Image (cartoon, grey):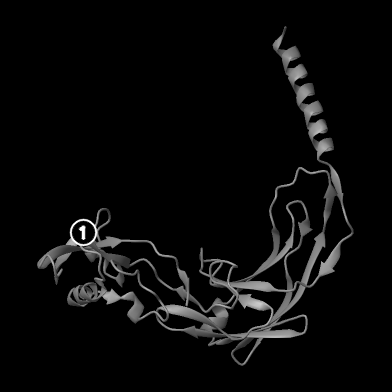
Amino acid sequence: MSIKKIFIIVSVVVIIGSVVFIGKFSGDYKKEKFIVPETVDLYLQPAFNESEGIQLLLNAPAGDGCDRVSNLDISKGTKEGTLFVTINGYSIEEYVGNGGCIAMLKPASIKINIDEFLQSGGRQVYFKMDEKESSYKLIKDAYAIYFEPIKVTNVISDGLNSIHQEPQSIALILNTEKFAVLGLNGSFRDMDYNPQLRAVAKAKGLTIVDEIYKGFTNQEGRGLWVIAEDSQIPDTVPAIIDEITYDSSSWGLETVSVTISRSSISPTYEY
């Protein structure tokens, strides 16, 4: 059989298979309707690239995998240091068919860049949706941006997920490049070494993260987040920078090494 005939046969099989596949999972869409969501989740996002900037992400559960869902429709404006956002809703065309769709929730979303608003001294965000009002306070210092609820109804702040029953205060760290962790190396007792680690950090001229970032919680027990210069942080394995001597009661005085290691950290946290 010639190569040309083989190609023709394969092509026909592929076309027939495609028609069967499409026919099996074909469906239709209901008439488009406009919906005002009951609640909208609110997130504070870092600048993933220079063109995006710092953003507020509004996210509302809307449809299933094959539904056609629009972005959230909003209107916004600023006045005297306040950003006013009215959330109108979203459009959806619900899929009606025999399957073939991915089992997933499809949100209606929109991002609001707040770089210029922050630079101009903006310090409050006011939301209105379905005649209900929510407001948040923005605080910016040299280290972070803090987003705190004032009055919340149906636009609910959530830093990491949607499991909270109450709105969360969210912090966005502006620079995470010089974050490191002080830890322990070797055999040590199960006790709280945090005070000793803090003493080592200050003796080495390191900045302790929870002393400058509002609401930041350090690792409990054996780790302490610090900010250090690049020359103080090893690129690979942890480096020993000091020792801690402690009284273990039954064993007497013991010594354990203190290490520093580069560690990535999420730019946002809740408090």
Among the 4 quarters of the image, the one containing residue 247: bottom left
Image check: 137 left or right of 3?
left
Q: Position of residue 218 (x, y in %)?
A: 35, 72
Q: SS class of the residue under badge 1?
A: strand
Horizontally, residue 194 falls left or right of residue 74, namely: left
Quadrant of res 117: bottom right
214 horizontally vs 21: left or right: left
Residue 108 is situated, as x and y percent measured from the top left of the image, at 71, 64
Q: Which residue is mark 1?
A: 185
Residue under the point 17% across and 76% down: 203
Label 1 sits on what residue type? Answer: Asn
For label 1, the crowd category at 10 Å Cα-Cα, with few meaning under 14, some 14 to 19 and many 20 or more, is some
Q: In this view of the protein, which residue sits in the foreground, 19 or 192?
A: 192
Q: Is residue 76 above or below residue 237?
A: below
Residue 256 percent location from the top left of the image: 16, 63
What residue is rendered at 80% in x and 65% in y? 91
Looking at the image, the residue that sits furthest to the right is: 31
* Quadrant occupied by the N terminus: top right
Quarter where residue 181 is shown? bottom left
Q: Is residue 137 above or below residue 71?
A: below
Q: From this viewpoint, which residue is outermost toward the front?
A: 250
Q: Residue furthest top?
A: 1
